[in-house]
Amino acid sequence: MEKEKWTTAGENNEMWNGEGSVQGIYVSKKEDVGQNKSNIYNIRKADKALVGIWGSTVLDGRFSEIEIGSEVKVTALGEKESKTGKTYKDYTVEYREVEKSEEDKIDIKDIKF
């Protein structure tokens, strides 16, 4: 029997560098992280690597309408200038619901404690 691979909770394999794009399943959100009390959005890529994306005003707003378990694609658009003249990093965030198979659906009453 093959050993199950265990993942340590709270660890990311890597943090996204904010360039290009990252795509995968949105698996969790951590809040109030670090000195700036930022969010981290955790994405599980197709190769099973877990990638963390640091939140920002733009990303927090975009992720606010996305449910955990959705497939997401985040693309960096570079720096933009706001109406007040300040620059900020802009992103396109696309998402879609993932169809779950019957095997993926777990009823809490089926779990033996």
Image: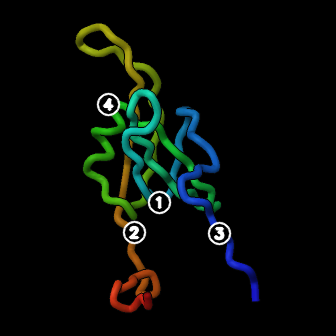
Mark 4 packing: few (<14 Cα in 10 Å), some, or many (20+)?
Answer: few
Q: Residue furthest front?
A: 113
What is the count of numbered marks? 4
Q: What residue type is labelled 2?
A: Val
Q: Distance between the residues labelled 1 and 2?
A: 8 Å
Disc 1, SS: strand
Q: Distance between the residues labelled 4 and 2?
A: 26 Å
Badge number at residue 75: none
Disc 4, SS: helix
Q: Distance between the residues labelled 1 and 3?
A: 18 Å
Going from N to C along the chain, the mark reached first, 3 or 2, is 3
Name the residue: 44% across, 43% down: 40
Badge number at residue 25: 1
Q: Which amino acid does label 1 sit on?
A: Ile
Q: What residue type is labelled 3?
A: Trp
Residue occupied by mark 4: 57
The image shows residue 107 at horizontal and vertical percentages of 35, 86
Mark in the foreground, 4 or 1: 4
Q: Using the rendered view, name the quadrant where residue 95 is placed.
A: bottom left
Q: What residue type is labelled 4?
A: Thr
Badge number at residue 6: 3
Q: Could you tell whether 20 is left or right of 84 in the image?
A: right
